[in-house]
Image (tube, rainbow, N blue to C red):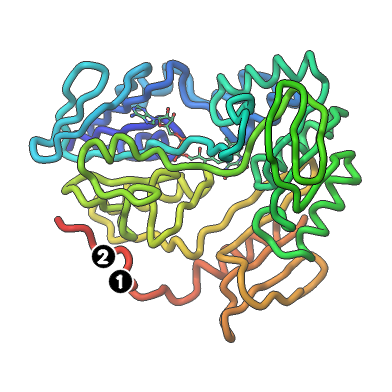
Amino acid sequence: MRVVIVGNGPAGVEAARLLSREHEVVLVEKETVSHYSKPMLSHFIAGLVEEKRLFPYSPEWYERNGINLLLGTEARRVDTSKKILNAGGGELPYDVLILATGARPRLPPVEGKERFLTLRTFEDAERIKKLLDTEGEMIVVGGGFIGLELAGNLAKRGYKVTVVEKEKGVLGLDEELTGRIVNVLREAGVEVLLGTSVLKVTEDTLLTDRGELKGRLKVCAIGIEPEVSLAKASGIETRRGIVVNRRFETSAKDVYAIGDCAEYNGIICGTAKAAMEHAKVLVNILNGIPDRYLFERRSSIFKFGDFPIAIVGVPRGRGVWLDRETKAFYDGEDVVGVVVLEDMKKAQEWVHHFLEAPPPPEEPPPNPPDPPR
Ligand SMILES: Cc1cc2nc3c(=O)[nH]c(=O)nc-3n(C[C@H](O)[C@H](O)[C@H](O)COP(=O)(O)OP(=O)(O)OC[C@H]3O[C@@H](n4cnc5c(N)ncnc54)[C@H](O)[C@@H]3O)c2cc1C
C-alpha cells in the first residue's frame, strides 16, 4: 500500500515510522528543516538545551526506515476522486492519505497584533532567542501550557518574565489549581497577571485594561488554530479542525486526519502526546487491527520550570482534592478528569485507570456522524 502523509510533526513522523515497516511511505513537509521537538523549543530559547537536541531524526534515519521525505514541499490540493495529492508542483498518487498538518498560533484581534511574536516553529524559536539575548526580558501573553512552559524555563535561567492572562485561571483550570501553579511560578520569579486583557500592542509597550507594561519582546501564546486550508481547498469537511470520527476517517474516502488538525466532537487535542497516540491508533486500523481513539480520555503532561503537572481526561465539574497533589473532577458519580501536580507516578496510575475504564459507546450521536464513505 502507498501511504502519503502531509506533515512531519509528531503525528506525521510517528505514523511514517510505524507504517514504513510494511508499506511504501511518502512524507510531504513544507518546512525545509527536518522534524524537531516543539515541546523543547522553550528550553532551547532559554539556553537549557543545545540546538542539536531538538532534532531527534537525521536524514539517514528517514532513509534507513524507507521513508521518502520531501522537505520544502507544500501540499496544495487533494483530488479525492482520483486519489492524487498535488504537492510542490507535482502529483503524488496514494492508496491512503494522512493529513497531519498541525496548527498555527492564534492572535487576539487587537491593534498592533502584528508586533507579537508567536512560537510554533524552529524558525520562530531562533528569532525569539536572538531577541531575548538583546532584550533580556519577555512579556508572554497567554496562560496556557506553551506560555507557562516558556515563562518557567526563562525564569529558571534568570530572565525577567511577565505572563498576562485574560482569564482568572491558567490552563483553563479552577481557582485552587491556578493558585497552586501560579504560586510556584511566582516563587521562581515570574510575574503573573491574571484577569488582564490586552488592548493594544506598540513597539515598546503592551497596553492592558489594567495599565501599561513596558517591554519590546512580546510573545503571544493564547492558543492554536488547526491548519485546515489543504482539507478545505479539497472539499474535505472541516469545522475548527478537520472533522474525524474515532477512527480518524474524514469525509473523503481513504483520507485520514490526525494530530492538532483533527477535530472530534468539538475536541482538538493540541498536544504532542495525543498526536503520537493518534498515529499509533490509525496505524493499527490501517494494518487491519480494530482500534479507536477515546478523545475524552486524552492526557497531557507539562513542566513549568521544574514543576510537572498532568491533566487527565476533562477537568470540569465538581472538583474534589483526593490528596495534596490530586484533584478529581466528577460528573455525577463518575470521575471525568483528574489534575495531578508534581507526582507523575501517580499521574501515570490515573492515565491507566482512565484507559482501563469501560469504553464509551462506539460513536456517540449526533456529532460527528460517521463521514460518508
Ligand atoms: C512551544 C511549544 C511547546 C509545546 N509543549 C508541549 C508539551 O510539553 N507537551 C505536549 O504534549 N505538547 C506540547 N506542544 C504541542 C505539540 O507540539 C503539538 O501538539 C504537536 O506538535 C502537534 O503535532 P502535529 O504533528 O499534529 O502538528 P505539527 O507539529 O504542527 O506538525 C504539522 C506539520 O505539518 C506541516 N504542514 C502543514 N500544512 C502543510 C502543507 N499543506 N504541506 C506540507 N506540510 C504542511 C507543518 O509545516 C508542520 O511541520 C508544544 C507546542 C509548542 C509550539
Residue nearest the viewer, comparing 335 with 57: 335
Does residue 89 sit above or below 360 in this rendering? Answer: above
Within-10-Å neighbours for mark 1: few <14, some 14–19, many 20+: few
Q: Is residue 223 left or right of residue 325?
A: left
Secondary structure at badge 2 equals loop
**What's the amino acid at mark 1?**
Pro
Q: Are marks 1 and 2 in contact (CB under 8 Å)?
A: yes
User: Which residue is depicted at the point 76% across and 32% down?
Assistant: 139
Which residue does the numbered mark 2 point to in the structure image? 369
Which residue does the numbered mark 1 point to in the structure image? 366
Q: Position of residue 280 (x, y in %)?
A: 39, 48
The number of numbered badges drawn on the structure is 2
Q: Is residue 203 left or right of residue 223?
A: right
User: Which residue is depicted at the point 58% across and 40% down?
Assistant: 108
Residue 261 occupies which quadrant of the picture? top left
Does the beta carbon of the residue at mark 2 sit less than 8 Å from ligand 1? no
